[in-house]
Image: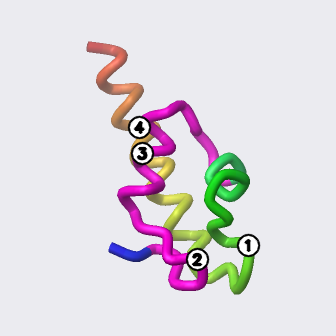
């Protein structure tokens, strides 16, 4: 699904960055440019990053 229409960034691209160690919206913004134009995608991008971080904590705990 497209998260950022301005930059054509998908949720999978954001998750891939999270798998590579990016753990914040600012890191995603730096790498992909998400939420750097109109900003409407910032909230959804943050949700994806936070969900990934929660899953990573759960997996690490196991």
Check whether the beta carbons of the residues at disc 1 and disc 2 lie within 8 A of each other. yes
Could you tell which of marks 3 and 2 lies nearer the N-terminus? 2
Left or right position of 47 against 43: left
Residue identifier under label 3:
16
Could you tell which of marks 1 and 2 lies nearer the N-terminus? 2
Q: CA distance from mark 4 to mark 1?
A: 25 Å
Which quadrant, please, contains the N terminus?
A: bottom left
Residue depicted at 26% across the width and 13% down the height: 62
Residue depicted at 63% across the width and 45% down the height: 24
Camera-nearest residue between 47 and 1 = 1
Q: Secondary structure at mark 3?
A: helix
Q: Categorize mark 1 by other alpha carbons within 10 Å: few (<14), some (14-19), many (20+).
A: some
Q: Where is residue 6 drawn, in percent x and y?
A: 59, 84
Residue identifier under label 4:
54
Q: Which region shows up in magenta?
A: 3-25
Q: Categorize mark 4 by other alpha carbons within 10 Å: few (<14), some (14-19), many (20+).
A: few
Name which quarter of the figure residue 37 lies in.
Answer: bottom right
Q: Secondary structure at mark 2?
A: loop
Residue identifier under label 2:
7
Q: CA distance from mark 1 to mark 2?
A: 9 Å
Check whether the beta carbons of the residues at disc 2 and disc 4 lie within 8 A of each other. no
């Amino acid at each position: 699904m497209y998260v950022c229409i301005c930059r054509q960034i998908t949720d999978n691209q954001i998750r891939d960055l999270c798998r590579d160690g990016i753990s914040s919206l600012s890191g995603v913004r730096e790498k992909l440019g998400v939420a750097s134009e109109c900003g409407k995608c910032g909230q959804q991008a943050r949700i994806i990053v936070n969900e990934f971080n929660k899953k990573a904590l759960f997996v690490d705990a196991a």
